[in-house]
Image: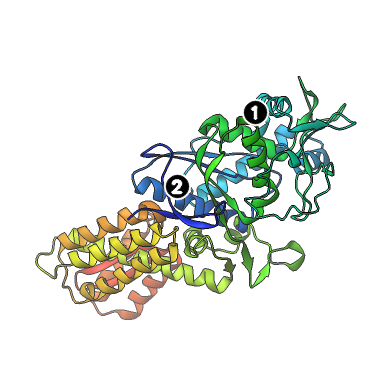
Amino acid sequence: MPLFVSNTLSGLKEEFVPLEPGRAGLYTCGPTVYNFIHIGNLRTFLWEDVLRRHLEFSGYAVTHVMNITDVDDKTIRDSAKEGISLRAFTERFTEYFFEDIRTLRVKPAHHYPRATDFIPQMVEIIRKLTERGFTYTSEDGSVYFRIAAFPGYGRLAKLDLEGIKPGARVATDEYEKEDVRDFALWKAEGDGPVAWDTPIGRGRPGWHIECSAMSSHYLGETFDLHTGAVDNIFPHHENEIAQSECASGKPFVKYWLHAEHLIVDGEKMAKSKGNFYTLRDLLEKGHAPLAIRYLLISVPYKKKLNFTFAGLEGAYQAVDRLSNFIARLNGLVESGADGGADILPQIKSFKEGFRAGLDNDLNTAEAIGALFSFIREVNPLLESNSLSALNAGLALQALREADAVLDLFPPAPKLQEEALPLIKEREVMRKAKRWAEADAIRTQLSEMGVILEDTAQGTRWRKKI
């Protein structure tokens, strides 16, 4: 079954057909490194991770580029407040970003270009735009894109350009959707603290030109996939299309994918409401990274995700259920048990359902539903000792294939030095029917993060997620 994606540009769900067979160029809008990223940002980065993984799972050789916005109004403002250089300020938050996505198992992009390393490429695009009549220079030396010269402006965001006022300009990097004006490509800074001396004058780039320069450098003037959150559609992605296509004379991106917002307890996330969370906030409250990853990928990217702590607890239980299922299958494989029921039909149904869900515009809810349907079907066979080691191994292999996309398997367990003697001591207590002492050891192990399960084959242990 082919992969279908919702293309914001056409407004249709389309079959993904890459420009080059077997290869996919993917550009994902990265963080502006002036603060810690919040869980809304993480929702976007995680569904993009699932997209990249599913493309690879489907056999595509993916080139994944994610930019680091290290120069814009906010990074300049906040580095000045701290009284340190822009580079020192942004490098700190760039490393915090990498720490966060590593914690949530996001696969590293192949390239993480920083905007400040691509000033010459931005200047070259602006030069081409000026040469072709798409820019003008304001009184202070700033260069603006003339949107009236590009008839295709507004088609991504479905803007109504009736009544647009020619020559009206907006200099800030971010602005409201109704603020359709010519936008700054280059901001003249004169003696400003953050500026570059270039053939088009001393200054610094506007936000939008940065992504056009970095994406085309690695992926070419036309590439397959560009993603981000819905709030990137306008002005950022609309302006990227305008400047890129006017500079190159070619279509910029074939498929535009945008994730819906994350809300918290049914409301927009805001510090003023006390419902604003970073990953670090959740970790400090004791929440497990795997549960956070599960929750943030469990809702399809085209739907709003309502983050609640009850939902996070449900995610923990789901991941714990998966962890327990894997532990039981591993135990059966190690036992070498013969005979038992044939589960090849269940494995086939699981694989087909999982793949169909993801091919349907990355419907992670459908894919995860197929996973837990499989668990429900196989668990009774485990309970009744009706499964062979061979079939348990086949089930584990199917789960590993799916986990290449979801990455929800628990880490390989390791016991603390003092845990194994306690497990053995508990077995002695159980055989002696000293139940109170056995239960006390179970409690002690639980406090150490070790969960015990007594089975017909003996006691198994696993680590809490």
Residue at image mark 1: 118
The answer to whether one can see residue 370 in this image is: yes
Residue 1's spot in the image, x, y percent?
32, 56
Task: Please name the residue shown 61% across and 41% down the image.
Answer: 95
Q: Position of 320 compared to 6: left or right?
A: left
Give the farthest residue toward the top: 199
Task: Please name the residue shown 49% across and 48% down the image.
Answer: 106
Q: Position of 165 compared to 4: left or right?
A: right
Q: How is the image coloured?
A: rainbow
Which of marks 2 and 1 precedes in the sequence?
2
The answer to whether one can see residue 407 in this image is: no
Q: Is residue 95 above or below residue 318?
A: above
Residue at image mark 2: 52
Q: Nearer the viewer, residue 444 or 233?
A: 233
Residue 254's spot in the image, x, y percent?
51, 44
- Please state the total of marks drawn on the protein image: 2
Give the farthest residue toward the right: 139
Q: Position of 412 compared to 272: left or right?
A: left
Q: Nearer the viewer, residue 129 or 449?
A: 129
Task: Please name the residue shown 72% across and 24% down the image.
Answer: 131
